[in-house]
Image: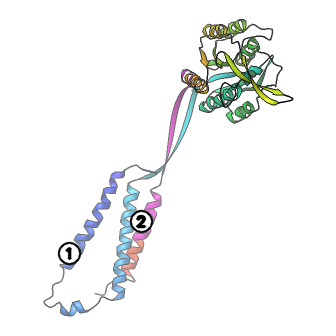
Amino acid sequence: MTLKDPWFLTFLGILPLLWFFQKRKKRAALRFAEFSSIKKASPPIRTVTRKWVLIGLSAITWVSFILALSRPQSVSAERIHETQGIDIVIALDISGSMQAMDFQPSNRIEVAKEEAEKFIRARKHDRIGLVVFSSQSFTQCPLTLDYDVLTRLLEEVHIGLIKDGTAIGLAIANAVNRLRDSTAKSKIVILITDGANNAGNIDPITAAELAKTFGIRIYTIGVGKEGLVPFPVDDPLFGRRYVQAKVDMDEPSLIKIAEMTGGKYFRAQDESALAETYRIIDQLEKSKIEVKEFSTYDELFVYFLIPGILCLFLFILLENTVFSKLS
């Protein structure tokens, strides 16, 4: 609630002064030579009741009128967001090498999923889709604004959904196919991988050329440490154990893909670096939002005026009937 003319409230401070001066005037109205008998006499209960009832009614009347004059209003605001959204496809590598445990205590795929979810939750007005790839590529979730559904589908992603391999070219082509008909002001692909293209019938550079044709930027993220990294191996005799292995990442191709399409390449060798990569991309790709606000005002003075009028009539009625003075 708001007040249209709040300056009327200053009159609330005048009321106590008026009551004070009126009281002094009444005290000075009669003079007695002897006060001893008056002091001993107590005023009749009817007089006391009449006094405080009339004072209360007059106070309520004046306060109600002053509040009504200050024009209380209820405000309801409606906001319209005019958004020039961004369409984003996350292409996530789920090949066997993403099981590497160099992101202790989790492996690469789990950390990549966790940071991707944080990135998704940080967006507000952008459509986001999810493509996964190994030896083949498929769409796990089409472009959507329903981030709850998207993150649930992201949680269901695991290594072994597709035959092992790394089809980076197919992943880019699949993501481009999802974005090519988009009318968004900006279209981007976030490609997350730890290997080199060794599957599929589309070359990554050719797929990047296709993305460039449709005005799609590709941000490439190479995850994992260099050199030997621990991999889990399930031994039928001794159970799970870890062996040291090396994953070859084709960084030159990832850099070229990003540069060709106007994106950037990032190397994330630990969880904090991957989180920082997503933060940078989040800052680079922001939606333009224009907010228009429309406010409607409902007058509420009647809720104070009516009680004030009723109290005024009741004051006049009581003063001239039940509480009338005997002359």
**Position of the C terminus by quadrant:** bottom left
Which residue is rendered at x = 67% and y = 26% of the image? 112
Amino acid, disc 1: Lys
Query: Which tag, 2 or 1, sits closer to the chain's start?
Result: 1
- Under circle 2, the secondary element is helix
Question: Between residues 262 and 304, which one lies in front from this camera angle?
Answer: 262
273 to 31, vertically: above or below:
above
Q: Where residue 170 sits in the image (x, y, percent)?
A: 76, 13
- Whether the magenta-drawn stretch holds residue 309 is answered as yes
Label 2 belongs to which residue? 308
Which residue is rendered at x = 71% and y = 26% of the image? 109
Binning the other alpha carbons within 10 Å of mark 1 as few (below 14), some (14 to 19) or many (20 upward) gives few
Specify whether 283 is left or right of 64.
right
Where residue 228 sits, quadrant-wise, is top right
Q: Where residue 21 sits in the image (x, y, percent)?
A: 22, 70
Which residue is rendered at x = 28% and y = 66% of the image? 16
95 to 197, vertically: above or below:
below
Tell me how far mark 2 sits from mark 1, CA to CA.
Answer: 26 Å
* Magenta residue span: 283-312
**Would you say residue 95 is visible in this rendering?**
no
Q: Which mark is residue 25?
A: 1
Specify whether 229 is left or right of 323.
right
Residue furthest toward the front?
A: 238
